Image (spheres, helix red, strand yellow):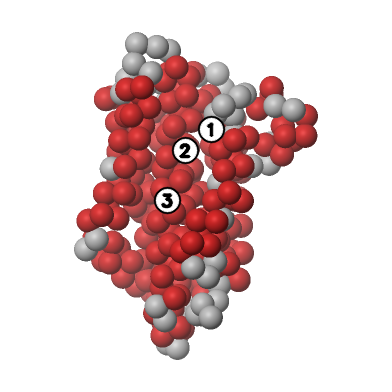
Amino acid sequence: MTLVRTFATAGRVLTQIRHDPRTVGLLLIVPSLLIGLVAWIFTDTDVFATIGPAMIALFPFIVMFLVTSIATLRERRSGTLERLFSMPMGKGDFILGYALAFGLLAVFQTAIAVSFAVWVCGLEIEGSIWLLFAVAVADALLGTALGLLASAFARTEFQVVQFMPVLVFPQILLGGIFLPTDQLPEGLEAISEWLPLTFAIDALTAVADGSEDAEWILSKILVIAAWIVGSIVVGSITLRRRTP
């Protein structure tokens, strides 16, 4: 694994995406539109102030998961990955290159989503806007990493979608969006405490209402970062050259 090959892979991916306006729109615009829709639904109520931080975690996470997993899978199904591996390129170069490319897109996506939620939708933030941004970026990168992990196991785009009930939906249901995690049944609360999206939602909510200090927020980011690294490592180990 070398940085030159990793950056070359990232550059190729970004070039491909740049020529696909629909994917660019899905990545950069759709999460903000969905956040705006939620804010619009709860106009003249206090609901958005409560669930707004969770929406910043939820929509970018889902979009990054879907786009990353499907894009990576298509490389394998089309035979592109097999041709790349016939050259001096390892699995680590490929996975890290994809992670770098979509990670950069995640930063732009998050900047747009956070700015839209705060300055257009009126989400009030008691804590640091930079901490909010940092947590939101980590959350979007988590979606990217889990998408790379799912693509390593899936054989078709339909199977990628099937991974959502396994990797995504439980985190949404148990992450504290519908019910605070401390009010969940004991067994489900224990499970939720291990899910990375729970850490992101907790951290974003804490930044929004100013209930925790920066050290506590950073500890949540470190847990999310550990999940990101673990997912990328497992994805690179299990990645196959071609889908049979």
Q: Which residue is mark 1?
A: 201
Q: Nearer the viewer, residue 138 or 192?
A: 192
C-beta proximity under 8 Å, tags 2 and 1: yes
Residue 187: image location, x then y, percent:
77, 34
Q: Earlier in the sequence, mark 2 or mark 1?
A: 2
Label 1 sits on a secondary structure element that is helix
194 relative to 77 in the view: left or right: right
95 relative to 45 in the view: left or right: right
Q: Which residue is mark 2?
A: 58
Label 2 sits on a secondary structure element that is helix
Residue with the most extreme bottom position: 86
Q: Give the number of the disc on residue 160.
A: none
Residue at 43% from the left image edge and 25% from the top image edge? 52
Residue at 38% from the left image edge and 18% from the top image edge? 42
Q: Residues within 10 Å of mark 2 (few under 14, many from 20)?
A: many
Q: Nearer the viewer, mark 2 or mark 1?
A: 2
Residue 136: image location, x then y, percent:
44, 38
Q: Which residue is mark 3?
A: 64
Please, is residue 235 above or below residue 82 in the view?
above
Q: The residue under label 3 is which amino acid type?
A: Met
Residue 51: image location, x then y, percent:
47, 24
